[in-house]
Amino acid sequence: MRSLQILFLVILCAAFVSGCSAVRKETAHQHLLSLSDHSLIPLTLKAGLIEVEVVNTAQTTQQGLSGRDQIGSDGLLFVFNQKSYQQFWMKKMKFDLDIIWLEDLRVVDITSNVPHPHLPADSLRIYSPKVPVNGVLEVPGGTVQRWQLKIGDTFDYSW
């Protein structure tokens, strides 16, 4: 009888521990897509902890930073449902940007020191990454150099 109680206790503990150590099935990217638009989240990179605003709806990704006087956080993170050659332009931008092109929070391309426009909207340059991406982080111009960010660096996000 005593050995059955011990066996039952061992099985119960094993079930509890396996449930606690279950692998998280949702990826960071999937979680970012599920956040409320304009959520502020912390990201960690080699330069330290930053706070970014997440935009993940068609309307807010189209609006981006157009018309703003400043970002309001360390950056604006665009999160897309699938990887593609995203296209960005600087329509109605009031300050210069660095554009960090991401695949699952890993830097795959960088466009530095993009000037705010001095031309009519129909003459603006379109910026696109060299590879398909599912995220874009816009930061003030010069930030990539200040953070010493390189292709292959990753941003860590825990939720």
Image (cartoon, rainbow, N blue to C red):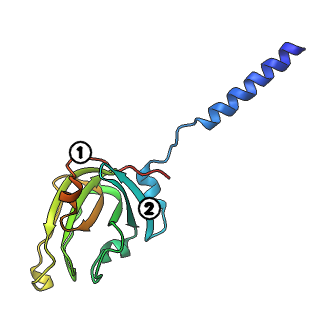
> Residue at image x 10%, y 83%?
118
Camera-side residue of 12 and 50: 50
**Which quarter of the picture shows residue 101?**
bottom left
Residue 85 x, y percent position in the rendering: 22, 59
State left or right for residue 156 relative to residue 23.
Answer: left
- The image shows residue 159, relative to residue 112, as above or below, that is above
Amino acid beneath label 1: Gly
**Which quarter of the picture shows residue 49?**
bottom left
Residue 5 x, y percent position in the rendering: 85, 20
> Residue at image x 35%, y 74%?
72
Residue 100 x, y percent position in the rendering: 24, 59
**Which quarter of the picture shows residue 133?**
bottom left
Camera-side residue of 144 and 27: 144
How packed mark 1 is, by other alpha carbons closer than 10 Å (few <14, some 14-19, many 20 or more), is few
Q: Is residue 85 visible?
A: no
Q: Is residue 32 visible?
A: yes
Q: Which residue is mark 2?
A: 41
Amino acid beneath label 2: Ile
Q: Which residue is mark 1?
A: 152
Which SS class for mark 1? loop
Residue 36 x, y percent position in the rendering: 49, 68
